[in-house]
Image (cartoon, rainbow, N blue to C red):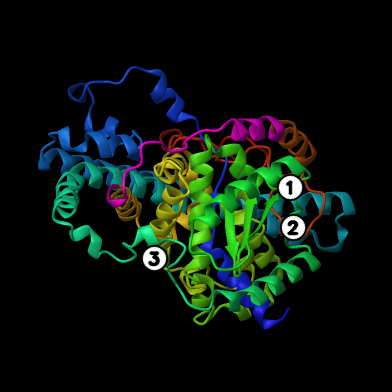
Amino acid sequence: MNEVFRQCVATALSILLIILPWYPARAESQAAPAAEPAKLTLHQYLQKPYEDLFQVASSLNFSASEVEQERQALKRGEDSCRSRFKEHAKTYSRQLDAARKQLKESGTTLADEPRRELHCKIQNLEMLRSEADVLSGHAIPTAYDNLGAKLDLIQQWPAQQRQALADLESGAYQNRRWADVKDIGFREIAAGQKDDIKRGKEAVDELKQVGMLPPELDSKPIQDYVRSVAERIARNSDLKVPLRVSVLQSREINAFALPGGYIYVERGLLEAADDESQLAGVIAHELAHDTARHSAKMMKRATIASIFYQAAQVAAILLTGGIAGIGMYYALQYGFYGLGLVLDLKLLGVSRDYELEADQLGVQYAWKAGYDTSGFIRFFDKIASKQGYVNGVSWFRTHPPFYERMVQTQREIMFMPKQSERIVQTSEFLKMKDDLAPLAAKAEKEDVGKPSLLMTREEGCKPPPKLEYTPGQPIEKLCAMPLYDESGETQ
């Protein structure tokens, strides 16, 4: 791999929007009549979407002691749940030690088939242990971070909302960075965008050559539709280079940008989005990374390229959206453990400031393109509150805190000039969803039986029949799950 490619691999993760199959809790909340504030407990409010909390927070009257009690209850819940899965990991480690001891003691006398079965057992136990490690070390803290952010919103947003309204009244909001939204398209967010075209093309070409990029979705109507949404946003942005958009055949709910106007949207994201404004919000966020040249800036600081050079398979997992799902995430963790390395995405140049910048610019571009600017918040809430606490662990744990992102995005929405009509849903989006359904069903059917752990040493092993996490599982249920061994039996 050349140096540019290795740097692009390291950088691409820092601008991923990582997301995956969703838990339909919002549908449940919509189905029931809206409850009066007095009828809900503080904990019940934490299950509500951010968008709803922004509307009702100023009308709630929970005392400081009630908030503190809830905060302590969340801490106890997190500590208990993390301890549970740490113990699970220790149990799997003991089973691993026993299996390896059996393999060692058998020596050369063990027949090929029993030896292979023992290899598969060890491989599956490693997978289960890694899953428990990821749950305790990343996913569970992410779930509780999100609940804590909603608690912060209930407590702190009323005062911040008053300040935002005061800034609107006084005109102080016009002093924020990139306040000149009426000049979108004529501004220069970051000079030298054209210099990124060659760098991005080289990265894409080499990714394709080595098979690290998922194939494009085989549907011209869907490809054309997504490009039309992206091009509408690009025309109403500060992008100065040609836009190249592709939909990839991957179940991961993910979108990412490479330098020079390359935007990739994965099939799973289209499946997860509820309306066109949500899709537009995600695309606008990714496009903003390119207009601000975040990838080029972070490449100058990248220090982990040599690690990716040693671990091409790990890099492949990153670039194919693998880190979006827990199966691929613990495969990544396993890969780094195998190299004796410690995974720390901060080394990849992940920048909290850059994500906040992309959030702000993304809102502006979605607004300029005529979309409902709450789309990004609604989509973010879906993945953070419902299932992203597991499947988006790395992205959520290395990006700005939920509360900071949501509040800054909401403030930017408040500061944007009001328009009477905003696009939320379109017939073209609904047609795309109809076209996508049979393609997704076919792809899922073809994926049945394929191992979820990419870094296998014994090919053809059946994966564990029962993992401890299933997509869409709420944190309360996860924390009450029994321990399974590699055969799928409870312990």
Between discs 1 and 3, the one toward the N terminus: 3
- Residues 22 and 52: in front is 52
- Residues 29 and 458: in front is 29
Q: Which residue is mark 1?
A: 451
- Residues 326 and 392: in front is 392
Q: Position of residue 79 (x, y in %)?
A: 34, 48
Dividing the picture into quadrants, the one containing residue 465 is top right
- Determine whether label 3 and label 2 are within 8 Å by CB: no
Check disc 2 and give the amino acid type: Thr
- Residue 263: mark: none
Mark-to-mark CA distance, 3 and 2: 34 Å
- Residue 352: mark: 3
Q: Position of residue 179 (x, y in %)?
A: 31, 62
Across the whole image, how many numbered discs are drawn on residues?
Answer: 3
Residue 200 shows up from this direction? yes
Q: Residue at x 70, y 41 (%)?
A: 222
Q: Which residues are magenta?
A: 414-436
Q: Which residue is mark 2?
A: 456
Q: Residue at x 56, y 40 (%)?
A: 468
User: Within 10 Å of the Cα at label 2, are there few (<14), some (14-19), or many (20+) other Cα atoms?
Assistant: some
- Determine whether label 2 and label 1 are within 8 Å by CB: yes
Check disc 3 and give the amino acid type: Arg
Q: Quadrant of the N terminus?
A: bottom right
- Determine whether label 1 and label 3 are within 8 Å by CB: no
Q: Position of residue 152 (x, y in %)?
A: 23, 47
